[in-house]
Amino acid sequence: MVENITSLTRNGLRDWLVQRISAIILAVYTLFILGFIVWHQPLDYSTWHQLFSLNWMRIFSLLALLSLLAHTWIGIWTITTDYLKCACVRLITQVIVMLALFGCLIWGILILWSL
């Protein structure tokens, strides 16, 4: 069992489950977006704006963003704990990635809810 302060759920099985569920959410979101693009040809700004002005689409996009960030964090955490043996370097790398992911979250929320 994984016991580490920087682990997302502090449990290896839960991390594995979060990564699998987030992958499913991302796959469904990707297929939906690709289907929308194919179905609405030619795609223009007003059609795209109408889609993202719907609250359910904003929530779906936010769920996809949160899934992407959780999936990314678990992957980065796994890689850094496996390959960066120096605890100081590993912690600095994880903090930098964590700050970047948090910045992406804030930026994504601002984009989604400021239309």
Image (tube, rainbow, N blue to C red):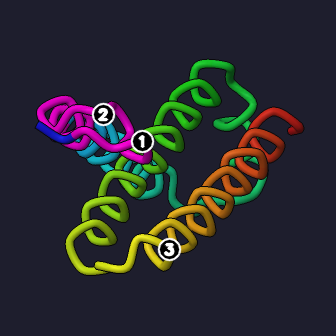
Q: Earlier in the sequence, mark 3 or mark 2?
A: 2
Residue 47: in sight, yes or no? no
Give the percent coordinates (x, y) of residue 56.
Answer: 58, 19
Cα–Cα span, label 3 and label 2: 20 Å
Choose between 96 and 60: the one closer to the eye.
96
Residue at 30 percent of width and 39 percent of height: 22
Instruction: Residue 33: say if magenta.
Output: no
Observer-nearest residue: 113 or 13?
Answer: 13
Per the image, the residue denoted by label 1 is 5
56 to 68, vertically: above or below = above
Residue range corresponding to the magenta coloring: 3-20
Q: Residue at x 27, y 47 (%)?
A: 27
In the figure, is residue 1 to the left or right of 76?
A: left
Q: Which residue is mark 2?
A: 10
Please state which of the two labelled residues, at mark 3 or mark 2, is closer to the viewer: 3
Question: Circle 3 — which element?
Answer: helix
Secondary structure under tag 2 reads loop
Dot label at residue 104:
none
Amino acid marked by disc 2: Arg
**49 up-or-down from 93: above or below:** above
Q: Quadrant of residue 50?
A: top right
Q: Of the residues under marks 3 and 1, which one precedes in the sequence?
A: 1
Q: Is residue 17 magenta?
A: yes
Callout 2 crowding tier (Cα within 10 Å): few <14, some 14–19, many ≥20 = some
Residue 2 is left or right of residue 57, and the answer is left
Q: Alpha carbon of mark 3 to alpha carbon of mark 1: how far?
A: 14 Å
Q: Which mark is residue 88?
A: 3
